[in-house]
């Protein structure tokens, strides 16, 4: 009898505004759905959580007509199980990390205001990683990794190869002076070996059980690499 494979926990931001700018934000829908579609295709189950629980805010720009036409968004728009899970996410503080094979953090600018300082986020990352699970994130999702530490107090990203939304891309979307910190710089400051591709190019970096992607174009690739690691264990 084959061993039961635990599901992947996907964690979304609960923050809906870009700080003092007042601009609306949230999670980026396709970064969630494109990774999930690959996980689903690989036969993996998933659960959805967020920093505060309940229904998290989607970035309005990720719900544009053009974005909603993306195949993964179309696919999940009629998936009743997904829609129910999205409206009723688990609060990260209530997550039992032992139930999951991996954790995945999609981006969206909202993450920059609530991922890095969340004790629940840091706990789940530490527990899943130290239990031999996979930790993954894409675009601004690696903000979850900035302050994540292991039980010995060291930063998880120290000495690890990572990708994340770059300082160049932040400048391109005119958010350099809006975000509370620059993600690329913050990761480097805590010892990460950051690898940048040209703006908006797919860039997925795998370092052991840490999988990170640079931008929305990298979401499916992150899902693919997470699935590979879980299924090849």
Image (spheres, helix red, strand yellow):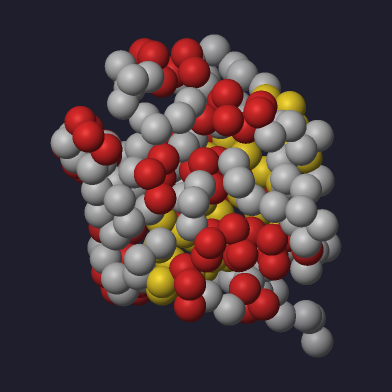
Q: Residue 165: x and y, percent?
A: 50, 28
**Viewer-proximal residue, 137 or 151?**
151
Task: Give the quadrant of the C terminus.
Answer: bottom right
**Is residue 35 something that shows in the picture?**
no
Describe residue 64's horizontal placement relative to residue 181 as left or right.
left
Q: Residue 183: x and y, percent?
A: 52, 30
- Residue beneath the point at 59% across and 17% down: 197
Indicate the quadrant where residue 181 lies: top left
Look at the picture and state if 173 lies above or below 77: above
**Viewer-proximal residue, 203 or 70?**
203
Describe residue 130's horizontal placement relative to residue 21 as left or right.
right
Look at the picture and state if 116 lies above or below 191: below
Indicate the quadrant where residue 133 lies: bottom right
- Residue beneath the point at 38% across and 44% down: 113
Task: Give the quadrant of the N terminus.
Answer: bottom right
Look at the picture and state if 16 lies above or below 56: above
Q: Residue 31: x and y, percent?
A: 43, 43
**Is residue 63 something that shows in the picture?**
yes
Q: Residue 219: x and y, percent?
A: 51, 40
Look at the picture and state if 228 lies above or below 174: below
Number of labels in the image equals 0
Describe residue 11's horizontal placement relative to residue 19 as left or right.
right
- Residue beneath the point at 48% across and 26% down: 182
- Residue beneath the point at 29% across and 59% down: 56
Q: In the image as oriented, which residue stretches furthest toward the bottom?
A: 1
**Viewer-proximal residue, 59 or 23?**
23
Describe residue 21's horizontal placement relative to residue 72 as left or right.
left
């Amino acid at each position: 009898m084959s061993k039961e494979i635990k599901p992947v926990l996907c964690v979304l931001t609960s923050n809906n505004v870009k700080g003092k700018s007042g601009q609306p934000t949230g999670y980026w829908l396709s970064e969630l759905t494109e990774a999930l579609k690959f996980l689903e295709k690989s036969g993996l189950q998933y659960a959805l959580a967020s920093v505060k629980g309940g229904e998290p805010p989607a970035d309005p720009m990720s719900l544009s007509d053009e974005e909603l036409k993306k195949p993964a968004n179309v696919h999940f728009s009629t998936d009743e199980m997904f829609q129910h899970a999205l409206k009723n996410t688990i609060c990260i503080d209530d997550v039992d990390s032992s139930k999951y094979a991996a954790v995945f953090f999609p981006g969206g600018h909202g993450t920059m205001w609530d991922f890095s300082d969340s004790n629940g986020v840091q706990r789940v990352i530490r527990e899943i990683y130290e239990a031999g699970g996979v930790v993954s994130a894409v675009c601004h999702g690696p903000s979850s990794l900035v302050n994540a530490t292991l039980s010995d107090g060291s930063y998880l990203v120290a000495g690890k190869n990572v990708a994340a939304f770059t300082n160049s891309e932040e400048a391109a979307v005119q958010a350099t002076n809006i975000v509370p910190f620059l993600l690329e710089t913050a990761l480097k400051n805590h010892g990460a070996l950051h690898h940048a591709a040209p703006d908006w190019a797919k860039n997925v970096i795998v370092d052991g059980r840490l999988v990170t992607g640079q931008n929305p174009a990298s979401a499916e690739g992150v899902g693919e690499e997470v699935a590979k690691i879980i299924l090849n264990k």
